[in-house]
């Protein structure tokens, strides 16, 4: 356990960079590991989740290392070339890592055991094992479909057509990755759009992929060649800095080269509607992804009802939105977000409990929460339940609290945002 505390801070000022995008980092390592030749990756997120994916791909035959120049080098095995690892793959805290790699393994003739930490071992895996078994893979584990799970990949995989029953980019990507080593056309139908990093990176690496209405078609057994990647800064990590600046009086910060894929920017749209002064500068494109510098200035916010259909584009950002909502006039209503209950923790229950303990006026709903303008006061340490975004959200709330807010275990922040506290302190926050 590693407690951290945050307290009332002066204006936040400066120009900073946040670590690379987690979703794109996982996918860059995976695609590089499947390509023939050497792919070089700059800006890779070096958080525990992504390093876990690197270790898993290494254990299945890819050569992955960081050069002296800070660039990551990946030598792939070719589609269909993964080998059986010698020991179980421990995916730590990472839902993306385990679900995407299960997709890959499902269509290779290998047997792999997947394990994870206490948080990951309580998360639902049937959402991937159900479609993956239709390719011909089989799964052994507990009846409730949680880790540990032993996957036996199909020897002769059959392509599938699958309509996603839940809006999940992880499930979509698991099916798409399984389709890579399957002859013929695999189709995923997605009625509610979710982040499309897999679609973009498949296209970037030259996988034959086509989009037709709600259908995503992937042609299997393509030969893909190595590509260099520049991973943009993670908009979900940037979100903590953005909210910090909006709620801390006098702040004016710029965050460089942030990914602004429209499937990820729901929080920024919401904060702008709440009155947030956020501007996008130097808009451009890198390796198939949209990027911009974000300038954020302290703003007087007003609560809104967040449109439920916006949820997939800000699914990871509701915890930190709660910190903005507590500073905003009136109330902020967040509904249609029941998926939050199966993240690294039950983020609705854990946020509500923590907010109440800090004196925030909040109501829990089955599918969300309503937060009303309140002054935060830290009392007993917030229980973070091995959830990085819970830890970071409460540390942001502490920046304008009357008394410091302490989180019981900040070590889990390393999964997605190494250097979080130091980076915030470098612009004027009090986190120690
Ligand atoms: C992710 C998809 C989302 C998100 C997670 C990363 C991805 O999960 O919450 O942090 O990289 O595909 P779901 O697919 O479960 O919504």
Image (cartoon, helix red, strand yellow):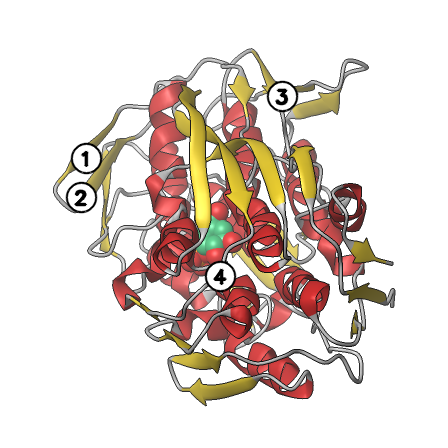
Name the residue: 49% across, 61% down: 300
Q: Are marks 1 and 3 in contact (CB under 8 Å)?
A: no
Question: Which numbered mark, 3 or 4, is in the foreground of this view?
Answer: 4
Dot placed on the residue nearer the N-terminal end, 1 or 3: 3
Q: In the rendered picture of this protein, how many numbered marks are placed on residues?
A: 4
Q: Which residue is mark 3?
A: 42
On screen, residue 43 above or below 124: above
Question: Which numbered mark, 3 or 2, is in the foreground of this view?
Answer: 3
Q: Nearer the viewer, residue 110 or 173?
A: 173
Q: Which mark is residue 215?
A: 2
How would you rate the neighbour count of disc 4 (Cα within 10 Å): few for under 14, some for 14-19, many for 20 or more?
some
Residue 360 appears in which quarter of the rendering? Answer: bottom right
Q: Are marks 3 and 2 in contact (CB under 8 Å)?
A: no
Q: Are marks 2 and 1 in contact (CB under 8 Å)?
A: yes
Q: Mark 2 to mark 4: distance in Å?
A: 42 Å
Dot placed on the residue nearer the N-terminal end, 4 or 1: 1
Task: Label 2, secondary structure: give it.
Answer: strand
Dot placed on the residue nearer the N-terminal end, 3 or 2: 3
């Amino acid at each position: 356990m590693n407690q951290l505390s945050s307290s009332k801070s002066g204006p936040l000022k400066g120009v900073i960079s946040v670590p690379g995008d987690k979703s794109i980092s996982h996918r860059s390592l995976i695609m590089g590991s499947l390509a023939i030749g050497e792919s070089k990756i700059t800006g890779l997120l070096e958080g525990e989740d992504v390093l876990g994916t690197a270790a898993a791909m290494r254990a299945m035959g890819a050569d992955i290392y960081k050069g002296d120049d800070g660039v990551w080098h990946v030598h792939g095995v070719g589609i269909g070339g993964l080998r059986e690892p010698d020991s179980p793959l421990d995916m730590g805290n990472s839902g993306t890592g385990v679900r995407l790699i299960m997709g890959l393994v499902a269509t290779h003739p290998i047997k792999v055991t997947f394990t994870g930490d206490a948080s990951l071992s309580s998360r639902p895996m049937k959402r991937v094992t159900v479609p993956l078994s239709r390719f011909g893979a089989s799964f052994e584990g507990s009846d409730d479909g949680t880790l540990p799970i032993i996957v036996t990949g199909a020897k002769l995989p059959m392509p599938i057509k699958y309509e996603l029953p839940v809006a999940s980019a992880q499930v979509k990507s698991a099916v798409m990755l399984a389709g890579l080593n399957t002859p013929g056309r695999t189709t995923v139908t997605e009625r509610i759009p979710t982040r499309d990093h897999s679609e973009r990176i498949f296209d970037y690496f030259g996988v034959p992929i086509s989009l037709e209405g709600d259908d995503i078609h992937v042609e299997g057994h393509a030969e893909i060649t190595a590509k260099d990647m520049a991973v943009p800064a993670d908009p979900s990590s940037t979100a903590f800095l953005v909210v910090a600046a909006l709620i801390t009086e006098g702040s004016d910060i710029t965050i460089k080269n942030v990914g602004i894929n429209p499937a990820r920017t729901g929080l920024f749209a919401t904060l702008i509607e709440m009155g947030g002064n956020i501007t996008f500068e130097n808009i451009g494109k890198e390796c198939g992804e949209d990027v911009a510098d974000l300038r954020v200035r302290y703003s007087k916010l007003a609560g809104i009802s967040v449109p439920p259909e916006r949820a997939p584009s800000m699914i990871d950002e509701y915890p930190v939105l709660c910190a903005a909502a507590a500073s905003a006039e009136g109330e902020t209503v967040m509904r249609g977000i029941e998926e939050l209950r199966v993240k690294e923790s039950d983020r609705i229950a854990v946020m509500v409990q923590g907010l109440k303990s800090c004196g925030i006026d909040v109501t829990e709903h089955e599918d969300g929460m309503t937060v009303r303008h309140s002054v935060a006061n830290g009392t007993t340490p917030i229980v973070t339940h091995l959830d990085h975004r819970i830890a970071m959200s409460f540390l942001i709330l502490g920046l304008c609290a009357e008394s410091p807010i302490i989180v019981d275990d900040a070590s889990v922040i390393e999964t997605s945002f190494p250097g979080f506290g130091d980076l915030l302190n470098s612009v004027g926050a009090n986190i120690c």
